[in-house]
Amino acid sequence: MSTVNQEPYRVGGKSFTAVAINTAAKAGEWIKSRLGDIRQVHVKYSPHDLVTEVDKGSEKMIKNLIMTHFPHHAFLGEEGVEPGPLASASALENVSEAEYLWIVDPVDGTTNYVHGFPFFSVSIALAYKGEVIVGVVYDPMRDELFVAEKGKGAYLRSVKLNVCSQISLSESLVATGFPADRSGALAVNMAGMTAIIPRVRNVRNAGSAALHMAYVASGRLTGFWEIGLNAWDLAAGALLVQEAGGKVTDTAGSPYTLSVRNVMATNSSIHDEMQQVLQEAGGTGL
């Protein structure tokens, strides 16, 4: 797996990608070591939106490691933002002018983590002038580290990733999630799910958007959509999918940006068909 970058993806001789990889690996091993040893679980935006001392500790570790190498870069981490979509949008707006912005979810899949369900990840992305140029998603339970650099492909264990070859929804295995916002986003997502389920081979919801997108990039899933996500849920995974030959947009089909909250990520071949089904079902949230 290459971690050597070219300008503008190097600063002071330090590879952005190497720092992201090393940081994700260290944080992932730490959260794995704490599995089953959680002392406090708190509710954030809703009873379905949890945070633990491990989330906060992981984010602190990640931020400290990144800032050691790149002290002048901006940082946006989930645990540094007040709960709720308005706060998330405001936090992203506050750093929108940053030249380099690290976007981090220290434990993507906290509910899984709390229950000991082994599907969670560390997600680290770096954006340059608003465009993601590095994305790393690490699954510590499987020791799978997915890495993407803009223009250089996506990799897992030094093997280049490619999206799967299915060409229709009827052949597809897709994934979604159940939003923490049970009063708004969940109803929209369920409308989409009701329409999608009869059209696909099957649907999965494993509880980590970052890993779902990594699975699209690696061909394990044909597509993924969800309503009401945040920049830290999506940034790294979006680059993985794009660099593996897939397509990422919002649920209306507009190009992916850091501000997208309602997302579709596919192998590209099923993208239009999937978007049309969601649109007709009122499942886009837009």
Image (cartoon, grey):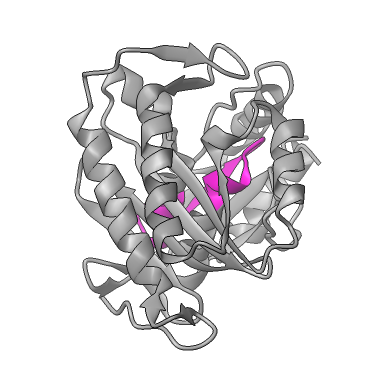
> Taking 103 as reference, is 122 left or right?
left
Tell which of 173 and 145 is nearer to you: 145
Task: Give the farthest residue toward the bottom.
Answer: 6
Magenta span: 213-234
Tell which of 268 and 239 is nearer to you: 239
Q: x, y (%) of residue 224? A: 52, 47
Residue drawn at point x = 45 percent, y = 47 percent: 210
Relative height, residue 2 to residue 41 (above, below): below
Residue drawn at point x = 74 percent, y = 22 percent: 184
Q: x, y (%) of residue 13? A: 39, 83
For residue 171: magenta?
no
Q: Quadrant of residue 230?
A: top right
Please give the count of numbered marks on the rendered protein. Answer: 0
Residue drawn at point x = 35 percent, y = 28 percent: 54
Q: x, y (%) of residue 136? A: 40, 59
Tell which of 243 and 188 is nearer to you: 243
Q: x, y (%) of residue 55? A: 41, 31
